[in-house]
Amino acid sequence: MTIKAQRGTKDILPEESTTWQWIRKQAQNVFQNAGFGEISTPIFEATELFNRGVGDSTDIVNKEMYTFCVGGADKNASSITLRPENTAGVVRAYIEHNLNRISPPQKFWYFAPMFRYERPQAGRQRQFHQVGVEMFGASEPAADAEIILSAVELLNSLGLNNLSVELNTLGCKNCKNDYREAIKEVIKPYLPDMCDDCKMRFEKNPLRMLDCKNEACQKIFEKEEVKKVILKDYICNDCKEHFDELIKYLDSLNINYKINKMLVRGLDYYNRTVFEIKSESLGSQSAVCGGGRYDGLVEMLGGSPTPAIGFAMGVERLCALIDKKEPEKLDYYIVSTNTAEAIKLARKLRKMNKKVDYDFQGKKFSKQLEKASKIANFALILGDDEIEQKFYSVKNLSTGEQVKVSDINKL
Ligand code: HAM
């Protein structure tokens, strides 16, 4: 029996990798132009990092982590987890390498695989990739605007101009509590009708109940008295000012946004600004980008108090939205039955940074030309006459025009 790729994983074949390389290149341009440095952290980390960082009321930690024990029954055995997201890992690296010594804000970007044991469906894999940024050391609303702007700029550079940004504020340590209590009070009578996850969230992180996709729970959130609490502003003056300032920046940048009071995000670390960018054409997995502020996470993971904000986009979802890029053609395909000469010529041209290939299987001239016309811009013909009289015949494969060239450096 042949062995297949695991459910929820996908091979990225050469014909698709042109699009991937292009997305990575666009991200590199947009982020590096805005002063972000690239960071790569290991794909596995101590399980505790995610338990503490992402939070034990989240689906990610409770149901979706690829966790295993290494070290056997030994007393040094440790539990490690394939990263389900990258914010916790970047925060760990930020603390471990004292990156706060760089003058703030410290700005990082990444393009990397993530792992979540979810039920696979269109737009949802078990191994997927995120391109994202994390910024540390800036608490100002302008930092939130800068991060949302970076996300919008990347999407625009990929030709995605009409996606809408959904925005909310979760408040800070102080005002979040009033909101939590109000939600708990209004939901309490309905709790027996809610799903098991919401019953657990009710105790651990009541705001996360609003993220529940269960139909029975959704109906409860639509009840008049519950809606009233959701829509009422519980946030303190400082948080309100922060959010209002952010909105002014977004308006001045002509960034389209919609305030969505139900937007709470699926991870525990957020406070104040949270946002998502969605595309209707993606169906039920419509979020292309998710992010927000996480001012308490660095301290919670053992660093000094540091404001922070970031986002991540799903690369597979971006791929589904953009037109496929055609692989670039070779500059030359050498058509020759003299393999020894063809190898030498290919080596020379590759050193000149030309993309070159040739036949080394003794195929007929006509077959080689056929292949050349599929994969190259020019055929570089090296027949007996050419070798004897020391010239090259260069055939333009789109026009059919053929010229003689005596000096390879003039190609
Ligand atoms: P997230 O919302 O869990 O946030 O994921 C961000 C994006 O990753 C989603 O909007 C989606 O495009 C993509 N994504 C998530 N799960 C899958 C999946 N199973 N298959 C395919 N694509 C998926 C985070 O991960 C946060 N760390 C974002 C962040 C960075 N917040 C602050 N900094």
Image: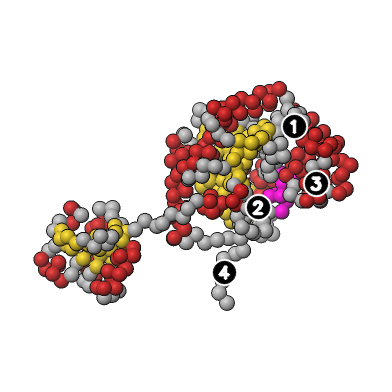
Q: Earlier in the sequence, mark 2 or mark 4?
A: 4
Q: Amino acid at mark 3?
A: Lys
Residue at left offset 46%, top offset 42%: 157
Q: Is mark 1 within 8 Å of ligand 1?
A: no
Placement of the N terminus among the 4 image quadrants: bottom right
Q: Is residue 219 above or below residue 240?
A: below
**Residue 59 % position (x, y):** 71, 50
The residue under label 2 is 284
Label at residue 176? 1
> Which residue is under mark 4?
4
Image quadrant assignment for residue 269: top right
Q: Disc 3 designates what residue?
A: 219
In space, the residues marked 2 and 1 are separated at their CA atoms by 29 Å
Instruction: Indicate the amino acid at tag 1.
Output: Lys
How crowded pointer 2 is (Cα within 10 Å; few <14, some 14-19, many 20+) is rated as: few
Assess disc 3: are there few (<14), some (14-19) or many (≥20) residues with their C-alpha within 10 Å of its C-alpha. Answer: few
Q: Secondary structure at mark 1?
A: helix
Instruction: Tell me the CA gap for discs 3 and 4.
Output: 41 Å
Residues rendered magenta in the picture: 55-63
Q: Quadrant of residue 165?
A: top right
Give whichever of 179, 213 is nearer the camera: 213
Q: CA distance from mark 1 to mark 4?
A: 47 Å
Which image quadrant: the C terminus?
bottom left
Q: Nearer the viewer, residue 234 or 109?
A: 234
Where is residue 369 drawn, in percent x and y?
27, 69
